[in-house]
């Protein structure tokens, strides 16, 4: 049986999917017409400006909205004790990262892993965890109120699931959204990637979006 928190996660994920569908069907395609067709990335319009947030990166420095500008970014919520979804997703994203590695570092897409388990996941731990999959993955976390606000701004959710009776209290789990948010080079939420993930399709989409955005930003002679 599903736990109550898992049911809430599924309901919230369904609501986000319905919101995405409405955005795709009822907003004018003025911006989308300047972007390439995508297979894995589901773009919607208008892109949504994120409210102010402050996370802490694995090197101890703050991660604020301005840090996410200039690149297309995939944002994934998870935690280092995650038994399956998180390591699988980061491994698949590492395959995608290898495929776009030839793009200039100044515009190359990025993957941001945000731990929603600050009780156990220190900055050092999340850095070691994320970088074990790919050295370019950005890792960050924050206190629970800041994480809840950040997740909500991405139409995502997470919830701590207490350990079963007879199991140590620190062996709890965390239910969380499995989709990835897509941020555009202005740091706005511009779409979603929903599981199951296809690394090749995601890499192709992110590469095409990056190239289109860079071409649009280059002054014509």
Image: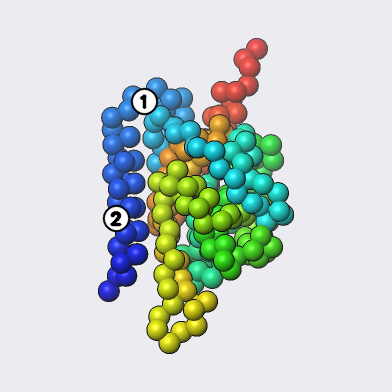
In three-dimensional space, the C-alpha distance between marks 2 and 1, rounded to whole angstroms, equals: 28 Å
Q: Quadrant of the C terminus?
A: top right
**Mark in the foreground, 2 or 1:** 2
Q: Position of residue 107 (x, y in %)?
A: 64, 36
Q: Nearer the viewer, residue 87 or 210?
A: 87
Vertical arrangement, residue 29 with respect to residue 209, above or below: above
- The residue that mark 2 highlights is 11
Can residue 36 be seen here? The reply is no
Vertical arrangement, residue 131 with respect to residue 163, above or below: above
SS of the residue under disc 2: helix
Q: Position of residue 203 (x, y in %)?
A: 53, 46
Q: Position of residue 58 (x, y in %)?
A: 67, 56
Q: Nearer the viewer, residue 18 or 62?
A: 62
Vertical arrangement, residue 162 with respect to residue 122, above or below: below
Residue sitting at 34 percent across and 53 percent down? 13
Identify the image quadrant of residue 197: bottom left
SS of the residue under disc 1: loop
Q: Quadrant of the N terminus?
A: bottom left
* Left or right of 172, for residue 68: right
Q: Earlier in the sequence, mark 2 or mark 1?
A: 2
Residue sitting at 66 percent across and 43 percent down? 102
Q: Position of residue 110 (x, y in %)?
A: 60, 45
Residue sitting at 41 percent across and 50 percent down? 156
Mark 1, residues whose alpha carbon is within 10 Å: few (<14), some, or many (≥20)?
A: some
Mark 2, residues whose alpha carbon is within 10 Å: few (<14), some, or many (≥20)?
A: few
* Left or right of 3, for residue 210: right
- Disc number for residue 29: 1
């Amino acid at each position: 049986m599903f736990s109550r928190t898992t049911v809430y996660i599924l309901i919230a994920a369904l609501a986000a999917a319905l919101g995405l569908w409405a955005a795709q069907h009822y907003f004018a395609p003025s911006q989308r017409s300047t972007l390439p067709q995508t297979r894995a990335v589901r773009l919607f319009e208008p892109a949504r400006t994120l409210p102010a947030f402050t996370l802490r990166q694995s090197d101890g420095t703050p991660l604020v909205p301005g840090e996410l500008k200039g690149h297309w970014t995939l944002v994934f919520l998870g935690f280092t004790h995650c038994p399956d979804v998180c390591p699988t997703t980061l491994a698949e994203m590492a395959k995608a990262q290898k495929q776009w590695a030839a793009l200039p570092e100044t515009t190359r897409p990025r993957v941001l892993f945000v731990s929603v388990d600050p009780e156990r996941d220190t900055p050092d731990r999340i850095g070691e965890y994320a970088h074990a999959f790919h050295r370019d993955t950005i890792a960050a976390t924050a206190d629970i109120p800041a994480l809840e606000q950040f997740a909500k701004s991405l139409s995502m959710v997470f919830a701590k699931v207490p350990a079963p009776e007879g199991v140590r209290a620190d062996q709890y789990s965390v239910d969380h959204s499995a989709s990835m948010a897509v941020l555009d080079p202005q740091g706005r939420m511009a779409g979603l990637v929903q599981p199951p993930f296809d690394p090749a399709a995601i890499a192709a989409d992110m590469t095409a979006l990056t190239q289109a955005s860079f071409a649009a930003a280059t002054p014509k002679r």
